Image: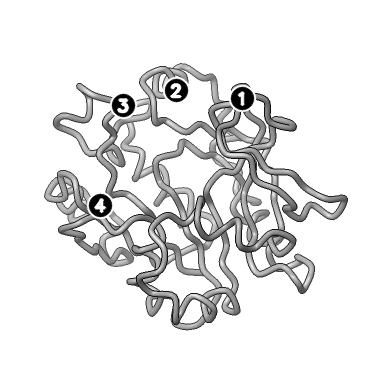
Amino acid sequence: MKAILMAAGYGTRLRPLTNTIPKCLVPIKGKPLLEIWLERLTEAGIGPFLINTHYLADKVNAFIAESPYRDRVTLVSEPVLLGTAGTLMANLDFFEGEDGLLIHADNYCLADFRAFVAAHRQRLPECLLTLMTFRTETPSTCGIVELDSQNIVVGFHEKVADPPGNLASGAICILSKEFLEWMQDKKGQFHDFSSEILPLFLNKIYTYETENVFIDIGSREAYQKANAIEVKSEEFGRNGE
């Protein structure tokens, strides 16, 4: 299964660290975040990959050129940021009409991706996407999802003061080929995937909840937490083996 990794962001809340390092390459326990993604996804049998670039793109290019994944990565430069939906729509052909992953690669995520793919393949037929979710300690700062008894999304609550629960969207989706077909004639209509497209598919989004480490490193506090958290070696290597 192919995957698009969104990696073009500025990481403004991580400054001054991101004054010289693109957000996707900030180190977690000494290893660039993007390397963690490529390593874990490859171990789970996922790939090839498309990665969009913009801010400090030359450093991302150099990192990929020297990495063991260089032959499995297509880099796409965006002189003007297209937004997550725009990037997807500009690169729909990458999936070649098959199901694929859309990943916001600014998360430190140790989920079991084999289990995630298996959940997608076992979803109910009316569901066109499978969304990864996780439990958050700060629900008012996240996009909280409401589910029915079959783990299908019936509501989104984006960064509200008193959300109904703490189950958050991980902004990592497996997109069915039927969904990708729907996207084909929508070019130019959307900018942000999570806020503009996902709400259109209530009752058609299946979910998979990861119990492994999942941290959005968008703030300095979260980045420090990601580097400080104790991770068992078996959890870091857990991808369904």
Q: Position of residue 143 (x, y in %)?
A: 58, 39
For label 3, the residue is 13
Q: Are marks 1 and 2 in contact (CB under 8 Å)?
A: no
For label 2, the residue is 222
Number of residues whose C-alpha sits closer than 10 Å to that of mark 1, classed few (under 14), some (14–19) or many (20 or more): few
Q: Are marks 3 and 2 in contact (CB under 8 Å)?
A: no
Q: CA distance from mark 4 to mark 2?
A: 26 Å
Q: Nearer the viewer, mark 1 or mark 2?
A: 1
Q: Residue at x 51, y 68 (%)?
A: 100
**SS for callout 3:** helix
Q: Amino acid at mark 1?
A: Ala
Pointer 3 or 4: first along the chain: 3
Q: Position of residue 198 (x, y in %)?
A: 57, 57
83 or 3, which is in the foreground?
Answer: 83
Vertical position of residue 164 compared to residue 183: above or below: above
Q: Amino acid at mark 2?
A: Ala
For label 1, the residue is 161
Q: CA distance from mark 1 to mark 3?
A: 21 Å
Q: Are marks 3 and 4 in contact (CB under 8 Å)?
A: no
Q: Amino acid at mark 3?
A: Arg
Q: CA distance from mark 1 to mark 2?
A: 19 Å
**SS for callout 1:** loop
Q: For this view, does 115 lie left or right of residue 113?
A: right
Q: For this view, does 51 lie left or right of residue 146?
A: left
Q: CA distance from mark 3 to mark 4?
A: 27 Å
**SS for callout 2:** helix
Q: CA distance from mark 4 to mark 1?
A: 42 Å
Pointer 1 or 3: first along the chain: 3
Q: Position of residue 193 (x, y in %)?
A: 47, 57
